[in-house]
C-alpha cells in the first residue's frame, strides 16, 4: 500500500515492485475509498495500539470500541499509512513474504536460534551455541541459494557476534581489494564455500591505531622462495582479531615486509594457521582466545584471539600483491595498480559500520519508546489512570532526539553505500580526486555514529528506569555488544584527528583557487559564512585569519518558525563548521612546528571535526512531514547540545538560541502522536528485538514476572549454600555481642 500516485512511481522502489507482480501487489491509498475506511474501522474497533498509545487522542478503550466517529478516520488513515507502508518505503527489514522474512520467522520458531538464555550460559556453552547458530544459518543460506546480500541480512538477524562476521566482513574484502586476479581465483572460491575460514590479523598487543608501528615481520628468503613470518617480541603478538581464537583456519596477517635487509612498509600475507584435517595449530604457531570481555553474553560469543609466529614459512605467492610485488630474486616492484585502490575496501567496511550503528540505535530506541508508552507514573486525577511516561517533556527531550538520530544515521548509511559505489567506479577509472575527501568522510562518520550510538543505548537503558537494568530488557547486552565499535576499525578519537588534518589542509587551500569537493564543498562559501548576513557590510577576505569578524556575525532568524526552514538550519551548521575550522587553522599557524601545534590543539581539532561530521549527516532534500519533524529535532537538539560552539563563533545570538529551544519543544509535541508508528516502521520482530520491555503487544509486566522465574536461582526454593553458610550464621550465639 502506498499514498504515492502511480504517476510518481517511476524511478522509485515502487516501480520495481510493480514490475514484479508475481510477488507484490501494490495498492494506491485513497483516503475516502471503502477498503481503507473499513480497515480503519476494524483497527479502531479492535482497540489496536491503545495500550502502546498508537492513537493517543482517544480517551479509553471502551469508548473506542463502541464508537469510531467518521471525523477520526483521517487520523486512523495516517496510522495505517505509517505503520503499514513505512516498513516498505524505509526498507529497514524487507517486504513481508520475502525469502528473508521467511528465514527470520524460522529463526523465531527454531530452538537452534534461541537467545533468551544467552546471558546465563557459561563461556564454553555460549561459544558452542554460537557455532551451532552459524552452522544452521549457513545451511539455510545454501538451501535457499541466497545471494551475498541476502545472506548478509540473514546473518544480521541471527543477532550474535560470530567468526563469520570477520570471515565475510574483513577476510574476503581484504583478498578482493589487495589480492591479484590469480590470488582471488585461488582463495575466494574456498572462502565463499567455507572450505577455509579466515580472519583479519592486524592489531597487536602493543599497537592498534598506529599500523606503521606493527612489529610482526615478514622476511623474504630468496633461497627457498618463501616469507618467514615471525613475532620478535611479546608486544608483536596479534591480539583481538575476531574468529582467530578457536575457529579460523587462515588469516590475512599484516607484517613489516623485509627483503635483503631493507624494510618496505606493512603488507598483508595469507597464512594458514590450523590444519584442515584435525584443526590443530600448524608448527611454529601459538594461538588461543584472549579471555572474557565486558558484559554477560554480548561479545563473548566471539573468539577474539592471540597469535604468535615462530619463524613460520609461507610461499612467496601468499603475499597479497595487487599493489606491490616481490620477485623471485627478492626485488620489490610497484605494480601498475594504484595503491589507492586498497582504500575501496576501507570505505566499504566503514559504510557497513555506519549502517550497523543505525540498526543498533533504532533497536534501543524502539525498546525505550514502546516501554515509555506502557509505563505510567504520577499524574492520577481522582483515581484515574496515571500519565504515560512518554507524555512527560523530560522523557521526550531525552528520547525523541535519539529517535531522530536513528533515522538520520539510517539515511546517511544509505548515502555511504552510494559513496562506496562512486569511489569504486572512480578508482577503477584511475580517478583519485575524491579519495582524500571520501577517506575523511567515512572516518568521521564511523566515529560520529558509533560514539553517538553507544551513548544513546545507555541513555535508552536509563529511560527505561530500573527495569532497563534487567538483562531481559535487552539493553544491557545490546550496550555491551555494541561499544567495541567505538574502537575497532579505528579508534574514534584517532579517526577524528585524521578528519581534522584533512579539514586543516582544505582550509589552507581556500585562497589557492583549489575548490573544495564533496562534503567540504560548503567551504567554498567561506567568505559568506564568515560574515554577517544582515546589517554588516561584506568585505573581501584576503586570508582565513580574519576571525575578528566572527564575534559580530549572526543570522537574522528572528522568529520561532524560522528554525523550521531547512535552509536556515543548514546555513547555521555550515557557518559553525567553517568558523571552527578557520579558528583552528589560525591557532595552528602560530606554532613554528605544525606537528607540535597539532598535538597541542588536538582536543580543539577534534571538536572542529565533529562539527563537520554532524553537518554531513544533516539532510539536504525534502522529506515527508513526520521525517521533516525528526530532521528538525536532530538539528535543533545538536544546536542545543553544542550551543557554546554556535554562540562563541557568532553563528547565532542568545535570543535566537532561546527561540530554537521553543521550537524544539513544539516539535516534540508533533512527534508524540506518531512515535510508536515511527519505531514500528523499523519492523523488528520480538525475537530479534530480544526485549520484554519492547514487546510489540505491550504485555510487559506479566512477561517480566514470567521471565524472573526462569532464572536458574529459582530452580530451588532454598539456595545452594544456605545450609553451609547462611544457616550457621542464623543459629550462632554471640555471648559478647555488642550489636
Image: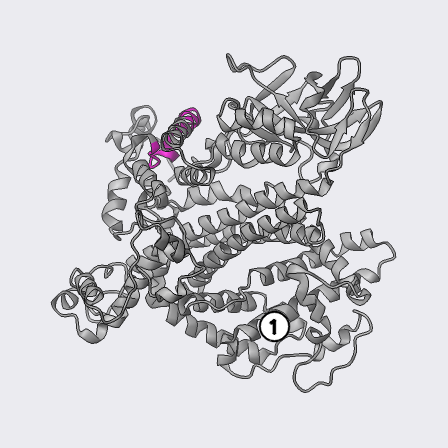
Q: Residue most toward the right? A: 592
The residue that appears at 61% across and 68% down in the rendered structure is: 573
Q: Residue furthest bottom?
A: 535
- Provide residue 524's location: percent of width, then percent of height: 71, 68
The quarter holding residue 103 reads top left
Q: Find the residue positioned furthest to the left.
A: 66
Residue sitting nearer the eye, 442 or 103: 103
Instruction: Determine the residue positioned at 35% across, 36% down.
Output: 115
Disc 1 marks which residue?
572
Left or right of residue 155, residue 235 in this image: right
Q: Secondary structure at mark 1?
A: helix
| Residue 4 shows in the view | no
Residue 126: in magenta span: yes
474 versus 369 height, above or below:
above
Q: How is the image coloured?
A: one colour
**Magenta extent:** 113-131
Dividing the picture into quadrants, the one containing residue 640 is bottom right
Which residue: 62% across, 48% down? Answer: 425
640, above or below 167, in the image: below
- Residue name at image x 45 percent, y 59 percent: 11
Picture layout, residue 143 above or below residue 518: above
Q: Position of residue 22 (x, y in %)?
A: 30, 47
Residue 140 falls in image quadrant: top left
The residue nearer to you, when weighing 167 against 465, is 167
The quadrant of the rendering that contains the N terminus is bottom left
Amino acid at each position: 500500500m502506498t499514498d504515492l500516485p502511480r504517476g510518481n512511481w517511476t524511478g522509485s522502489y515502487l516501480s520495481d515492485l510493480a514490475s514484479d507482480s508475481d510477488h507484490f501487489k501494490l495498492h494506491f491509498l485513497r483516503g475516502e475509498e471503502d477498503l481503507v475506511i473499513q480497515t480503519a474501522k476494524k483497527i479502531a474497533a479492535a482497540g489496536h495500539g491503545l495500550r502502546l498509545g498508537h492513537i493517543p487522542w482517544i480517551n479509553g478503550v471502551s469508548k473506542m470500541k463502541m464508537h469510531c466517529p467518521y471525523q477520526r478516520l483521517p487520523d486512523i488513515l495516517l496510522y495505517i499509512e505509517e505503520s503499514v507502508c513505512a516498513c516498505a518505503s524505509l526498507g529497514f527489514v524487507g517486504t513481508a513474504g520475502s525469502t528473508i522474512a521467511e528465514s527470520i520467522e524460522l529463526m523465531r520458531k527454531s530452538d537452534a536460534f534461541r537467545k533468551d538464555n544467552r546471558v546465563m550460559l557459561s563461556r564454553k556453552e555460549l561459544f558452542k551455541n554460537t557455532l551451532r547458530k552459524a552452522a544452521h544459518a549457513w545451511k539455510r543460506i545454501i538451501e535457499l541459494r541466497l545471494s551475498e546480500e541476502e545472506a548478509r541480512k540473514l546473518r544480521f538477524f541471527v543477532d550474535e557476534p560470530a567468526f563469520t562476521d570477520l570471515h565475510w566482513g574483513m577476510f574476503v574484502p581484504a583478498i578482493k581489494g589487495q589480492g591479484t586476479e590469480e590470488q582471488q581465483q585461488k582463495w575466494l572460491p574456498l572462502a565463499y564455500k567455507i572450505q577455509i575460514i579466515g580472519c583479519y590479523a592486524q592489531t597487536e598487543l602493543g599497537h592498534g591505531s598506529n599500523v606503521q608501528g606493527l612489529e610482526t615481520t615478514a622476511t623474504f628468503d630468496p633461497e627457498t622462495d618463501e616469507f618467514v613470518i615471525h613475532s620478535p617480541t611479546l608486544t608483536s603478538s596479534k591480539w583481538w582479531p575476531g574468529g582467530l581464537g578457536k575457529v579460523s583456519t587462515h588469516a590475512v596477517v599484516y607484517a613489516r615486509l623485509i627483503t635483503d635487509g631493507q624494510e618496505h612498509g606493512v603488507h598483508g600475507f595469507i597464512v594458514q594457521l590450523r590444519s584442515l584435517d584435525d584443526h590443530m595449530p600448524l608448527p611454529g604457531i601459538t594461538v588461543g582466545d584472549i579471555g572474557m570481555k565486558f558484559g554477560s553474553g554480548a561479545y563473548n560469543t566471539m573468539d577474539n584471539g592471540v597469535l604468535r609466529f615462530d619463524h613460520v614459512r609461507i610461499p612467496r605467492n601468499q603475499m597479497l600483491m595487487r599493489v606491490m610485488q616481490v620477485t623471485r630474486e627478492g626485488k620489490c616492484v610497484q605494480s601498475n595498480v594504484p595503491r589507492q585502490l586498497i582504500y575501496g575496501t576501507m570505505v566499504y567496511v566503514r559504510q557497513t559500520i555506519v549502517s550497523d550503528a543505525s540498526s543498533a540505535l533504532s533497536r534501543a530506541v524502539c525498546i525505550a519508546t514502546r516501554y515509555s508508552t506502557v509505563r505510567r507514573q504520577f499524574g492520577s486525577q481522582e483515581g484515574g489512570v496515571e500519565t504515560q511516561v512518554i507524555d512527560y517533556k523530560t522523557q521526550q527531550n531525552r528520547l525523541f532526539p535519539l529517535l531522530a538520530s536513528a533515522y538520520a544515521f539510517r539515511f546517511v548509511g544509505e548515502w555511504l553505500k552510494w559513496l562506496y559505489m562512486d569511489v569504486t567506479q572512480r578508482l577503477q577509472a584511475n580517478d583519485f580526486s575524491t579519495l582524500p575527501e571520501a577517506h575523511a568522510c567515512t572516518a568521521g562518520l564511523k566515529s560520529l555514529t558509533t560514539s553517538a550510538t553507544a551513548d544513546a543505548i545507555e541513555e535508552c537503558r536509563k529511560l527505561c528506569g530500573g527495569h532497563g537494568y534487567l538483562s531481559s530488557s535487552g539493553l544491557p547486552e545490546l550496550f555491551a555488544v555494541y561499544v567495541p565499535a567505538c574502537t575497532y576499525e579505528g579508534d574514534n578519537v584517532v579517526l577524528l584527528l585524521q578528519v581534522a588534518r584533512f579539514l586543516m589542509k582544505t582550509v589552507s587551500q581556500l585562497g589557492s583557487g583549489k575548490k573544495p569537493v564533496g562534503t567540504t564543498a560548503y567551504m567554498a562559501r567561506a567568505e559568506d559564512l564568515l560574515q554577517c548576513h544582515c546589517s554588516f557590510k561584506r568585505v573581501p577576505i584576503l586570508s582565513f585569519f580574519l576571525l575578528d569578524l566572527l564575534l559580530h556575525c549572526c543570522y537574522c532568524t528572528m522568529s520561532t518558525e524560522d528554525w523550521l526552514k531547512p535552509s536556515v538550519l543548514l546555513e547555521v551548521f555550515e557557518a559553525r563548521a567553517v568558523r571552527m575550522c578557520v579558528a583552528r587553522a589560525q591557532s595552528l599557524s602560530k606554532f613554528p612546528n605544525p606537528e607540535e601545534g597539532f598535538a597541542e590543539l588536538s582536543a580543539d581539532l577534534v571538536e572542529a571535526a565533529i562539527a563537520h561530521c554532524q553537518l554531513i549527516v544533516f539532510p539536504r532534500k525534502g522529506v515527508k512531514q513526520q521525517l521533516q519533524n525528526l530532521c528538525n529535532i536532530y538539528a535543533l537538539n545538536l544546536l542545543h547540545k553544542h550551543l557554546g560552539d554556535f554562540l562563541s563563533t557568532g553563528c547565532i545570538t542568545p535570543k535566537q538560541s532561546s527561540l530554537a529551544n521553543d521550537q524544539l519543544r513544539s516539535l516534540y509535541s508533533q512527534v508524540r502522536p506518531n512515535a510508536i508508528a515511527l519505531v514500528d516502521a523499523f519492523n523488528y520482530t520480538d525475537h530479534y528485538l530480544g526485549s520484554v520491555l519492547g514487546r510489540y503487544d505491550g504485555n510487559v509486566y506479566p512477561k517480566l514476572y514470567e521471565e524472573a522465574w526462569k532464572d536458574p536461582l529459582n530452580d530451588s526454593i532454598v539456595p545452594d549454600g544456605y545450609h553451609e553458610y547462611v544457616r550457621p550464621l542464623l543459629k550462632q550465639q554471640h555471648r559478647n555481642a555488642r550489636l
